[in-house]
């Protein structure tokens, strides 16, 4: 279990706070808006009203006691930048900050953020990949070149074995699991026959995935 400080309770911050709490971690949520703080209070370990650009207020939270500090202020970049900088100055072990644009990400990384998330950009990419392909159901980005994809079986793969389709040799793509009715099979055999209602979890470069599945 980790201890998380989350600053900024807009729509994105609310969702992050609730998700972290549901995963069983301790969450301290902070926002200047009393209504937002009261709304999130039933779903987190604790919540406080306060200005995250105020050094004295942040010091009172004991920043270095948290495993990770997540700053999700989306509508005031100056406050986002100041908060990020103060968190690092006060000894935060890990600072994750939200950016809405690439230039914001660069400033945040220069001023204390260990990592930056851009939810709009990430969702836009997921949407584009998901709904412009006949085979891609989901994906997880690993870096700028690689990702894990959940894919439907192309029609000509049905009834053939993993060994026969041999996408590792042809495209450099690794099959990580075979999924059927929500159940994940990680210990499949290369000789297992692929069925119509199955999907595959595959790992590879974007270009290889695009070529293999005609994205």
Image (cartoon, helix red, strand yellow):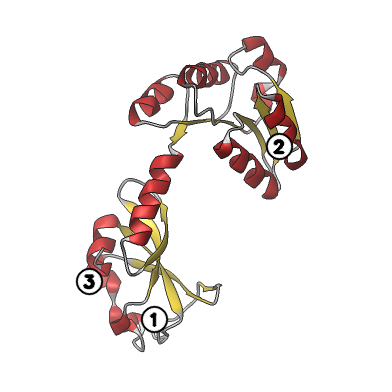
Question: In the depicted view, which residue is nearer to us: 8 or 163?
Answer: 8
Mark 2–mark 1 Cα distance, whole angstroms, equals 48 Å
Q: Tell whether 214 sits left or right of 33.
A: left
Query: Between tags 2 and 1, which lies in front?
Result: 2
Nearest the eye: 64 or 24: 24
Query: In the rendered image of this protein, does residue 214 appear above or below residue 56?
Result: below
Q: What residue sits right under mark 3 in the picture?
A: 170
**Closer to the N terminus: mark 2 or mark 1?**
2
Q: List the residue tagged with mark 2.
A: 40
Dot 1 lies on which element? loop
For label 3, the SS is: helix
Q: Residue at x 66, y 24 (%)?
A: 33
Q: Are dots 3 and 1 in contact, CB under 8 Å?
A: no
- The residue depicted at 40 percent of the width and 59 percent of the height is 148
First along the sequence among labels 3 and 1: 3
Residue beneath disc 1: 190
In the rendered image, residue 80, in percent from the top left (x then y), is placed at: 50, 22
Left or right position of 85 against 204: right
Q: Quadrant of residue 46?
A: top right
Residue 91 screen position, x and y as percent:
59, 20
In the image, residue 177 lies at what x, y percent?
46, 71
**Crowd tier of the residue under label 3, counting other residues whose Cα lies within 10 Å: few below 14, some 14–19, many 20 or above:** few
Asked if 110 appears above or below 150 in the picture, the reply is: above
Image: 158 above or below 109: below
Q: CA distance from mark 2 to mark 3?
A: 50 Å
Percent across and percent down for residue 120 are 42, 41
Which mark is nearer the camera, 2 or 3?
2
């Amino acid at each position: 279990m980790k201890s998380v400080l989350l600053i900024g309770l807009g729509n994105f911050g609310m969702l992050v706070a609730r998700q972290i709490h549901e995963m069983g971690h301790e969450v301290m949520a902070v926002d200047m808006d009393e209504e937002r703080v009261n709304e999130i209070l039933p779903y987190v370990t604790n919540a406080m009203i306060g200005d995250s650009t105020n050094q004295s207020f942040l010091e009172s939270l004991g920043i270095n006691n948290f495993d990770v500090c997540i700053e999700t202020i989306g509508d005031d970049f100056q406050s986002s930048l100041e908060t990020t900088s103060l968190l690092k100055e006060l000894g935060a072990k890990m600072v994750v900050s939200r950016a809405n644009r690439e230039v914001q990400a660069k400033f945040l990384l220069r001023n204390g953020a260990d990592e930056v998330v851009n939810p709009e950009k990430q969702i836009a990419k997921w949407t584009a990949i998901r709904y412009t392909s006949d085979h891609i159901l989901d994906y997880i980005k690993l870096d700028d070149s690689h990702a894990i994809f959940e894919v439907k079986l192309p029609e000509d793969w049905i009834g053939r074995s993993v060994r026969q389709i041999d996408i590792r040799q042809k495209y450099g793509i690794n099959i990580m699991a075979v999924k059927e009715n929500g159940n994940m099979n990680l210990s499949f055999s290369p000789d297992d026959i692929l069925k119509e209602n199955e999907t595959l979890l595959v790992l590879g470069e974007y270009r290889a995935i695009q070529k293999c599945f005609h994205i």
